[in-house]
Amino acid sequence: MVYIDPPYGIRYGSNFQPFVNRRDVKDGKDEDLTQEPEMVRAFRDTWELGIHSYLTYLRDRLLLARDLLHESGSCFVQISDENLHLLRSVLDEVFGFDNFVALIPFRKKLMPFGTIYIEQMSDFILWYGKSKKSGESRSSLKYREMFVPKDVRGDTDWVWFLDPDGKPRKMSSYQNATHMDIPAGSKIYRLKSLEPSGPMESGMFDFTFEGKDYPPPKNGYGTDPNGMETLARLKRLQVKGNLLNYRLFLDDYPVMALTSPWNDTVGADEKRYVVQTNTTVIARCLLLTTDPGDLVFDPTCGSGTTAFVAEQWGRRWITCDTSRVATTLAKQRLMGATFDYYKLAHPNEGVGSSFEYKKVPHVTLKSIANNEPPGEETLYDQPLIDNSRARVSGPFTVEAVPAPNVKSIDDLRSAGFQPAIVPEKQEYPAGKMPALPALQADASIARSGPTLRQSDWRDELLKTGIRGKGGQMINFSRVEPLGGTRWLHADAETKAETRNQKAERVVISFGPDYAPLTNIQVEAAWAEARTLYPKPEILVFAAFQFDPEAAKDIDELTKEKTGMTFLTAQMNADLLTDDLKKKRSSNQSFWLVGRPDVDIRRVPPARSAGFQPASSSPLYIAEVRGFDYYNTRTGSIESGDTSKIAMWLLDIDYDGRSLYPRQVFFPLADEDEGWAKLARNLKAEIDLELIEHYRGTVSLPFELGEHKRVAVKVIDDRGIESLKVLQL
């Protein structure tokens, strides 16, 4: 199954949530404009040509969804009424009009917001199958019919009940409307005709009931004389006018098939994201078209509602988003979630064998008259629960694709690329690091190369400088192109602000337009910087985003090792937006990025009370002290605070390739969020002191793994990740 909840394409200059802990986003406000390059690119792709760009954006994703779907799969797209007609035309083109399944309105607003004309209270879901096959009923499309409780309050057919003594009574209008004041133990029922829809020869007979003969209706009775005797014996018959009817009790068939519209889906539950869908909406789509163990894909992750719902109902899932804020919220939501533990149909076969479900009777006239066991309906939204267990999210991985363009090996070789063998990283005295083999590649292969924008960026850098912490500035007397290099794009000189301060040579390496700066660029720029004469004092990597591995490499290239200061400068997304750019109160285009300040220290056993080490190995704790910032006045690195850390993860045995967090902390979480929410929902005996500890910046004691290497990933309130690795 694929579920897509895209931007609705009604405001082409709208904003997206820029911070993890702020949900009141206003369109047109400077402070709410996204700062993520991938999101800026999404803005340009989706909004540059208005509705044309928007529909192209959707069509690309729908084509991918169609190719990914199994033949029995379904695609659901959520949309508002403004572009519903256009999106349906696109879906008809991609999936074929004969694969249209349903249009489902679902209630989203609790009350009108106030418009000039009549207000639409619902959004819509367009449902298409991969292969419905016109003319064949559900031939290949997987479909599991869902049911909802039958509500007959106010229904003038359901006006009868048998009291506890078995006497039939008719409801008052109040009782019918509310089902109040009906004696406990009563059975509500309605009267249904015994006449079949067409003539039935075996039903053409007179029947005596309570001493009176009743002729058959026009088409006869819907059963034979024996069946009528059975109905009379079971007290299922009742006279209405001059005809016999049978009693259909509410608990004979207490549910009805789910239909549209869905009016019980108002608002998002536990809202975390400014545009978040109620879980009921996605859960119904998922339960209608998948079984436990099936795979669900959502290319519009948001706060992770689809992943959360899939995890809840035992489906596998994949989700993605261009926003780091969104993926950070999704990670937090999943790690703090608890779910019911459903009983498996075949425990030894795993979740793919399905669940044990609640079933309800489906009693019919035929089953009563023939004294047959009633039919059953399976309630796929009501698996049987094992209350002795609780369930949390299963393991999941977070993968990133830092570069948007990939070329094949043949393309690289035809362009003259020869892979270089780079020696393993070691520590060398300042100025003694051996030269790395040259990267024999055209700049356009590994990244976009010098772009047309870089001339503008150099001019902007000369005009505004680089802002440091507390209003400090690195100002330049000149910023010029740097010839003969591929990875260094500007040569600059700082202004000497005081007599005692000397001008320093600075070289700048700009990151790609719409992707993070990678560690390949860090290595290549550093290799080029070492060949320059005179040697630069400072190497600045300026980018819209930094890949965590690249940021780690920059962090490791200290002045003590290299004889040069390495700085990371964040570039303002306004430098990308041009015609989409909004007027800001601040015109600062470059500012220094802080690096995680992490301390690892040994702790004596006395400080590790309650922790039982597996061996006699020494214990350590990690502390995140904040972010390191470059003091432009003194030229030294100083520490900042921890107020903007949304989440940090500790891997006590980092293998240099993938992060495996053993401890996860949520410093910005409220008292009822993060692990505290998980502890509350588990309803188990939880150490509240430890839960409070996981909202801090100091880890629990741990033993080192075989690699003797600790990695700490810090995620700030914008979703930006920084990685710090320490070898012990």
Image (cartoon, grey):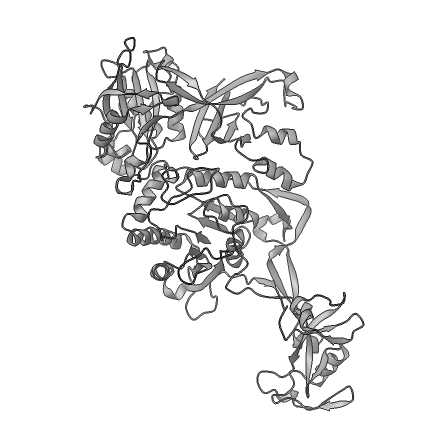
Most distant residue in the right direction: 165
x and y percentages locating residue 236 in the rendered image = 72, 77
- Residue 161 locus on image (x, y percent): 72, 72
Up the image or down, 240 lies above or below 321; here it is: below
In the rendered view, tell whether residue 427 sits above or below residue 287: above
Task: Identify the residue at horizontal 22%, vertical 28% (top origin).
Answer: 459
Could you say where residue 625 lies in the image, as x and y percent from the top left? 49, 22
Q: In which quarter of the image is residue 588?
A: top left
Q: Which residue lies furthest to the left in this view?
A: 483
User: Residue at left 33%, top 61%?
Assistant: 93
Residue 71: image x %, image y %?
Answer: 43, 58
Query: Is residue 677 shown left or right of residue 25?
Result: right
Front in this rendered view, residue 228 or 266: 266
Q: Can residue 711 be seen in this view?
A: yes
Residue 171 falls in which quadrant of the image?
bottom right
Left or right of 396? Residue 183 is right
